[in-house]
Every structure is written in structure tokens, then in C-alpha cells.
Image (cartoon, rainbow, N blue to C red):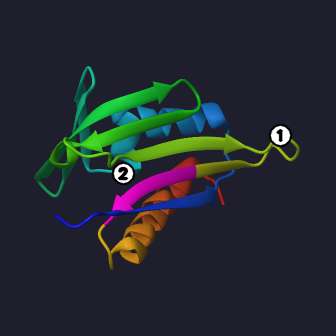
Amino acid sequence: MEAKIKYELEIPIQVSPSLLYTYISTPSGLSEWYADNVNSRGENFEFIWDGAQEKAVLLTKKNTERIKFRWEEDADTDYYFELRIQVDEITKDVSLMITDFAEDGEVEEGKMLWENMVSELKQILGST
């Protein structure tokens, strides 16, 4: 298996950090923009898109700040995806920081997918 490449995105989003955290950390919030449906049992999450399901394990969760998952298929690797809320101390601007991994040649596609999903999240939240 070829090594994946780590990439990060910073997407400004005009919304309160506590509301944003609800949308990135709960099954109901994630179902609004990330997947068609999300179920969880403890640290085990199931993400469903068009009838296909992917399983992930919750690695870390820090209230109002970040959530980190590892896909079941990446169980024996260091790969993960993380959604982190960053607030600028001076301007109070809020950004959603995304860390993910993709195979060589698929990084740009991965970034575009995240940008499209976060664009949908912004619409739901009434953010620009």
C-alpha cells in the first residue's frame, strides 16, 4: 500500500465556535452536511453515503475545539481525519481546520471534496 499524503485546509466560517462544534462532533450535526446519515455507539461511528457505509473510530474529542477519527480501513496506520475549530485571538474570526490524508494524485480532489462539504455546512449555518 502506497503511503498517503497529509494535507490541511483552513476554511473561514462566520459562526459561533460552540454551534460549529455541534455540527462537527455529533451524529445529527454530521448528518446535516458530512454524510447522509451518521450513527454512533460510544467511540464507534458509522457514516452512510448513498447506501454505502464506512466505519470510523473516534480517537480524540476536546469539547468546543476538535474531533479526530480514524477510518476502519486505516486501523493499522497513523492516518486520521481531524476537524478543529480555530479562533483568532485578536479578530475573533473562526476557521474550520481540516487535517486529512489522501493517496498521491488525490490530494487536490480531497481538498475540493472538503471545500464542497464545508460550503454546504456554511449554507446550513447561514454563514458566508
Amino acid bearing label 1: Glu
Is residue 28 positioned above or below 100 on the image?
above
Chief secondary structure of the magenta span? strand
Mark 1: few/some/many CA within 10 Å (<14, 14-19, 20+)? few
Q: Mark 1 points at which residue?
A: 89
- Residue at 61% over, 31% down: 18
Label 1: which secondary element: loop
In the picture as drawn, the residue positioned furthest to the right comes out as 90
- Residue at 21% over, 48% down: 74
Is residue 13 positioned above or below 64 on the image?
below
Mark 2: few/some/many CA within 10 Å (<14, 14-19, 20+)? many
Q: Percent position (x, y) of residue 107?
A: 39, 72
- Residue at 88% over, 43% down: 90
Q: Percent position (x, y) of residue 25?
A: 43, 33
Q: In terms of sequence position, does the residue under pointer 2 or pointer 1 come before the other?
A: 2
Q: Percent position (x, y) of residue 23?
A: 47, 39
Q: Mark 2 points at which residue?
A: 34
Question: Which quadrant of the rendered structure holds the C terminus?
Answer: bottom right
Total marks placed: 2
Magenta extent: 97-102
The reply, left or right, for residue 79 in relation to residue 48 is: right
